[in-house]
Amino acid sequence: MKILITGTAGFIGFHLAKRMAERGDEVVGIDVINDYYDVNLKYARLKESGIEKSLTTYNNPVVSSKYSNYIFIKLDISDKHNMEELFDTYHFDVVCNLAAQAGVRYSLTNPEAYIEANISGFLNVLECCRRVKIKHLLYASSSSVYGLNKKMPFSAHHNVDHPISLYAVTKKSNELMAHAYSHLFDIPSTGLRFFTVYGPWGRPDMALFIFTKAIMEGKPIEIFNEGKMRRDFTYIDDIVEGIINVTDKPSKGNPDWNAQCPDPGSSKAPYQIFNIGRGAPVSLLEFIQEIESATGKLADKKYLPMQEGDVAETWADISDLENELSYTPRISVKDGVREFINWYDNFYRFKVLKKRVRLRFTSKYNVLVTKR
């Protein structure tokens, strides 16, 4: 099939685009490549996918040197005109919207970025899907939508009307917007609430990256809520396989949906919400122990109170995805952390070595010039 994946310079989008290109789908990936975190990591992901940085000018299609069926275009989903032209040109079967302004804490100080990307940008995606009548829209939601909910495990059938960050508000808004378009225009849509995704090529603002960097550099790590945190850490390969399972099976209306007792996770319209996690929360201190084991170094721990906008625990009820779409997370936290550490060590050690070689060459060159 022909699929549009937004956010393919991002963590999940990068892995999904590679996986779908490898299985033979025609993939078009877009990303605005903003500077929320290090753009060099984003360009490195693209390079790993066969997309050279020098070719990625705005709105210019670049064919991957590794996958002839993968085209990347630097494009902002908030750019309505060029998004419409993109859909008119490629006639997508499926759209997977992973582009978003990420991060809970950043939303406390930069709310406008979330409205532009996560609301206005998503509206453009919906409108384009309506215009060309795509077969299936998938989009990234988040475990953050559960907010003040304390009923565990979190279920897609629970009420989620009490978010505690603007980031969560925008993700819940995406679910509501998608439902309206599914109802009005019969667009099959599926929202995926991601639970703490981690793994190689992960985001620098996520706990695993932050902790690993600090531990390997001998710096203290900050542990919030005095260490009383649990997260449903989910390895990237399991996430990607789950997304692909969902991609291949467009949502259908729930024939048992009852308007007198409405189920928040489904509808009479072709709309559904799934949790996608591992279904097994791990304490943050256990997670840090796995990092210590993989790096061979002990962390210098600094315990702090809870941060604004954060929650103490996440735990995904993944039974719907398991029962309906054969989703089976396989990677243990121990193995997943080791895979990340191996990638981090190789990626950043190589970058440091390249920098040192470049500096030595420059120094030698300057000496030669001086002698002349």
Image (tube, helix red, strand yellow):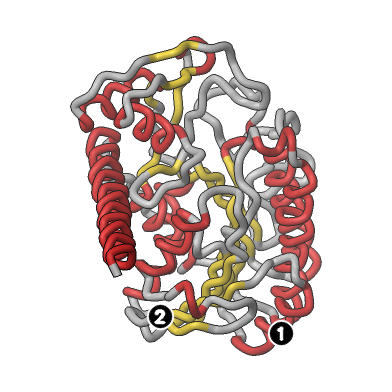
Which residue shows up at 56% across the image and 65% down it?
96
Residue sitting at the far bottom: 89
Q: Position of residue 164 (x, y in %)?
A: 71, 28
Q: Residues within 10 Å of mark 2 (few under 14, many from 20)?
A: some
Q: Position of residue 47 (x, y in %)?
A: 39, 69
| Relative side of 172 to 294, left or right | right
Q: Residues within 10 Å of mark 1 (few under 14, many from 20)?
A: few
The reply to whether residue 191 is in sight is no
Q: Specify the quadrant of the image occupied by residue 18.
A: bottom left
Do the residues under discs 2 and 1 have CB atoms within 8 angstroms? Answer: no
Of helix, strand and loop, which one carries label 1? Answer: helix
Q: Which mark is residue 85?
A: 1
- The amino acid marked with disc number 1 is Glu
Which residue shows up at 48% across the image and 59% down it?
42
Which residue shows up at 75% across the image and 33% down it?
161
Which residue shows up at 50% across the image and 62% down it?
9
- The amino acid marked with disc number 2 is Ser
Mark 2 vs mark 1: which is more N-terminal? Answer: 2
| Relative side of 84 to 314, left or right | right
Q: Position of residue 8 (x, y in %)?
A: 50, 65
147 or 365, which is in the foreground? 365
How far separated are the C-alphas under marks 2 and 1?
A: 21 Å
Residue sitting at the far front: 372
